[in-house]
Amino acid sequence: MKKVRIIVHGRVQGVGFRFMTKLVADELGITGLVRNEPDGTVYIEATGPTTSIDRFINKVQASPSPSAHVDYCDITEDDSLTVRKKFGVTYY
């Protein structure tokens, strides 16, 4: 089990990024959350099998939304993250 925090920088708000990220997470069996931050970034918590998390990270870095553009991601493994039952979209 791998747990990561991802802060996504770029044009990632108002372009369907959270919705598409949730679809990717659901497809890969990832649990966690995604939310917009006031500074224009998107915050993600993701938990799942290592291979699924690695695939998820690759898809996030490539931007799951065709309208978005990811400049870079800050990725941190964090074993203290809560394991959630599903992947949710939240609001700040």
Image: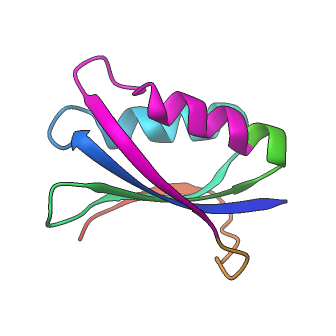
Q: Is residue 12 above or below residue 2?
A: above
Residue at 28% x, 47% y is 9
Which quadrant does the N terminus fall into? bottom right
Q: Is residue 82 above or below residue 91?
A: below
Q: Is residue 26 above or below residue 48?
A: above
Q: Position of residue 38 (x, y in %)?
A: 14, 67
Which quadrant does the C terminus fall into? bottom left
Give the camera-side residue of 21 and 62. Answer: 62
Residue at 25% x, 27% y is 68
In the rendered image, the residue lying farthest to the top is 66
Residue at 22% x, 21% y is 67
User: In the image, is residue 67 part of the stretch drawn in magenta?
Assistant: yes
Q: Position of residue 82 (x, y in %)?
A: 65, 78
How many numbered discs, if any?
Answer: 0
- Give residue 7's quadrant in the image: bottom left
User: In the image, is residue 22 part of the stretch drawn in magenta?
Assistant: no
Residue at 62% x, 37% y is 56
Q: Is residue 29 visible?
A: no
The magenta segment is 53-77
Give the camera-side residue of 63 and 25. Answer: 63
Q: Position of residue 11 (x, y in %)?
A: 18, 36
